[in-house]
Image (cartoon, grey):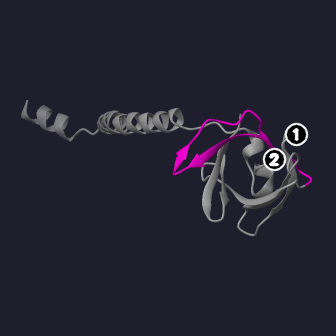
Amino acid sequence: MLARIRQRLLNEDGAVTADWVLLTATLVGMGFSSAASLRSGMNALAQDINAALSSASVVAMSMIGSGAARFQGDWSVSPVSGGVVGGAHPVPWTFMPDGTVFAGTIWAGSWTEQPDGSLAVSIRHHASGGTDSFTVAMNPNGLGFTAYQNGQVYRSAVRP
């Protein structure tokens, strides 16, 4: 009987199978624990992406670019006095690709792009014949511009 027990203990048949079962079970367990730890991180990442996309602004393709191309088209313009933006003027300012600018039949003029990307604008009022000049700089968000006259904020504009 003792010989049989000894023979049974020394017999290696099935030992490899037992090793593979143990190894496979360990790997499956490690996979589950890794997935569980990654899940919380992935959920946090998904929430961050959702928050970023929810607060993102959509910009028209015509506003993307650099320099004068960003200014082209119609703008709803408001006077600024003492840092306070007034109501929008009913006649928009229109910047054309050929370097001209106008406000309906009120005034017309020309613009030239400056090295810093702003526009130097010179206009002539149709009724009085008087002239005026100012600088137009795109706001950092690209959704509007600010006009400066004699170093002071003069007008504020957004796309209508």
- Secondary structure of the residue carrying numbered label 2: loop
Left or right: residue 113 versus residue 80 is: right
Quick one: which residue is furthest to the front in this view?
128
Q: Quadrant of residue 86?
A: top right
**Mark 2: few, some, or many residues within 10 Å (few <14, many ≥20)?**
some
Given residues 156 and 42, the one toward you in this image is 156
* Kind of residue at disc 2: Gln
**Residue 57 magenta-highlighted:** no
Given residues 17 and 131, the one toward you in this image is 131
Q: Which residues are magenta?
A: 73-98
Name the residue rendered at 66%, 58% in the picture.
148
Quick one: which residue is furthest to the bottom in this view?
115
Q: Give the residue pinned by disc 1.
A: 105
Given residues 51 and 75, the one toward you in this image is 75
**Residue 97 magenta-highlighted:** yes
- Secondary structure of the residue carrying numbered label 1: loop
For residue 25, the mark is none
Q: Quadrant of residue 123?
A: bottom right
Q: Nearer the viewer, mark 2 or mark 1?
A: 1
- Disc 2 or 1, which lies upstream in sequence? 2
Q: CA distance from mark 2 to mark 1?
A: 18 Å
Asked if residue 113 is positioned above or below residue 141 in the image, the reply reads below
Quick one: which residue is furthest to the right in this view?
98
Q: Give the residue pinned by disc 2.
A: 72
Name the residue rendered at 64%, 53% in the picture.
154
Q: Quadrant of residue 36?
A: top left
Q: Quadrant of the C terminus?
A: top right
Q: Position of residue 117 (x, y in %)?
A: 73, 62
